Amino acid sequence: MYRFLVFFLFSGCAYAQSSSPQELLKQAIAAQQSGHFDEAVHDYRLILEKYPNIFEIRSNLGASLAGEGLYTEAVTEYKRALSIKPNPQVRLNLALAYYKLGNFTLAASTLRTVHAEERANLQALTLLADCYLKLGENKKVIDLLTPIQQSRPDDRTFIYLLGTALVRDGQTAKGQVIIDKILRDGDSAESKLLMGTAKFMVADYAGARDDFQRAIQLNSSLPEAFAYYGMALLSTGDQAGARKAFEQELKSDPNNFVSNLHMGVLLREDQDYDGALKYLHHALEIRPGDPGVRFQIASVESAQNRLPEAGRDLEALVKDSPDFIEAHVALATVYFREKRKADGERERAIFARLNAARSAKNEVAVKTAQ
């Protein structure tokens, strides 16, 4: 690539800078390779002032900006490079930049294109599966990874992603098979986190808490370990400990959905409404449209006596999620507070009907289990 670029730049007209374009290119590549990304960014931008449509330089500028942690700017340059020439590797780099920004929806969308172009690209495959996990789309992880499960029997990252998705989807028996594969290597943080998740799913909160705690002891940097430990602590009545756990998770991963959501809920309960909204709005950025987060935001608005905003948000929520019982209850409450009795009675009737249906369903489930 370097020889091609030098030839291209030599063939151009005279350059107005003191350094020739080929010298700048050589300096930029050397700076990028040695980790001096700020210098590389400066030199690549100088070249692009004269030659704005060179794919490789746009791509390299994006990579250097990403190296500086300037992911928003990197996204812009990767998209410009792709407009010049489609390229799976640059598209993968674009997805990684979205991932670093916490925009897992756009990262997943971009990765789906990469996966369609390069089925054998395991980095794209595993990153796509991880994005789906972060978005709470466990079935998509299972659908993505199950067809190639047999070809990756010893890939710990692969089986961990699949096992986590199965457990979180409630398929604990299939998830146990994956857990057993990880347990072959002994008492690992990954296996404890998976086992804790399985126990949490069946409401064994004390057992889950102990497994999450052990996972943290084995590897305190394991992604989501503190988040799930926080949920288990909440479920066993330790709100103070849960808050510390969520805060610890957010130190290493500011884009952890579970921790942002629960920090928002805890701060709402403490009547720190501005603090709660900060976390809840970020949770909604991570999982756009999530009903639970939208409900919590409306609850904060209601507590702040911002009844018109709360009403609009709850109306939109029950339209998108008509079986969300608690949202109907909250909307009825808002209507009654606004002296809209007829609207409140209508929502109350919907709540009663949905609640009766839920009770009947639970009775059938109990009888079936017996």
Image (cartoon, rainbow, N blue to C red):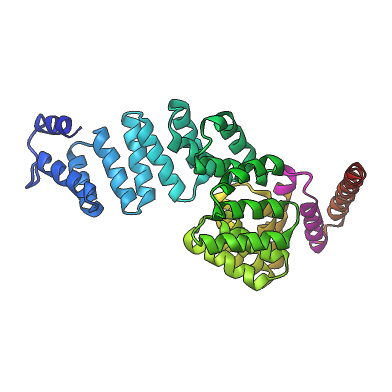
Which segment did they paint magenta? 317-338
| Left or right: 240 in relation to 92 | right
Q: Is residue 170 visible?
A: no
- Residue 27, image x and y in percent? 14, 46
User: Does residue 318 lie above or below 148 as drawn?
Assistant: below
User: Viewer-proximal residue, 137 or 313?
Assistant: 137
User: Viewer-proximal residue, 190 or 94?
Assistant: 190
Q: Residue at the location (56% across, 30% down)?
A: 150
User: Does residue 124 lie above or below 291 as drawn?
Assistant: above
| Left or right: 359 in relation to 109 | right
Q: Is residue 218 visible?
A: yes
Magenta region includes residue 316: no
- Residue 179, image x and y in percent? 62, 46
| Left or right: 184 in relation to 111 | right
Residue 51 falls in which quadrant of the image?
A: top left
Q: Residue at the location (80% across, 51% down)?
A: 325
- Residue 311, image x and y in percent? 73, 55
Q: What is the quadrant of the C terminus in the image?
A: top right
User: Does residue 126 lie above or below 275 as drawn?
Assistant: above
Q: Residue at the location (22% across, 45% down)?
A: 45
